[in-house]
Image: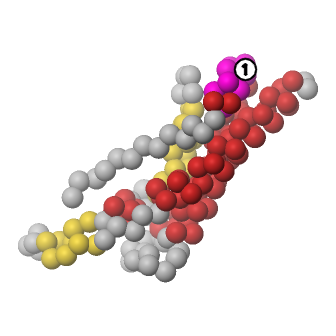
Amino acid sequence: MTRTKVNVTIDESGDVDRLLRTLPDILQHKQLPKALRAGAKPIIRDAKERVSQPGYPGDKPGKEPLRNTIHAVVRNYERTSIAVVGCSWPDGNHGWLVEFGHEIKRTTSGKIYGFAPPHPFMRPAIDATRSVVASTVLTVLQAGVKEFESQ
């Protein structure tokens, strides 16, 4: 089975784009990462709940529980910032196997003897929190504008 890359863009409101255009560059680079970190929190909370519910196949022996590996990293670039939400390496490196399912192979022969069904937790968490994330990001950005205007 090949690993699948999933990209999700949350663009619930053109207000965010308009608000970002009004921010000076220096404030944008300060407020946008802060807003992205705040916006990632509902996704992280929801995903952690999903890997703690009945039906989750369980944690990998000898590894940190998958729920403890879910986090966000904010990456800053010249013109924007992004938040990457997922499982950390190395303890969470099997998160995509849980999300998408995988073949079960014998290590000695490589023979496939089963399939572990998918137990999605990230995609449903993103879908379930989409509007909360958008409103959280917008609220933090608006607070940043008000703070900047009062200076």
26 and 12: which is toward the camera: 12
Q: How many marks?
A: 1
Question: Looking at the image, can residue 94 be seen?
Answer: no
SS of the residue at dot 1?
Answer: helix
Q: Is residue 149 above or below residue 72?
A: above
Quadrant in which the C terminus appears: top right
Q: From this viewpoint, which residue is outermost toward the right?
A: 150
Q: Is residue 26 left or right of residue 87?
A: right
Residue at 10%, 72% (x, y): give it. Answer: 111
Magenta span: predominant SS is helix
To which quarter of the image does residue 68 belong?
A: bottom right
Magenta span: 16-26
Question: Looking at the image, can residue 46 be seen?
Answer: yes
Query: Residue 149: x, y in percent?
Result: 87, 24
Identity, as a three-letter code, of the amino acid under mark 1:
Thr
123 and 61: which is toward the camera: 123
Residue at 83%, 26% (x, y): give it. Answer: 148
Q: Which residue is mark 1?
A: 22
Query: Residue 7: x, y in percent?
Result: 42, 43
To which quarter of the image does residue 83 belong?
A: top right
Quadrant in which the N terminus appears: bottom left
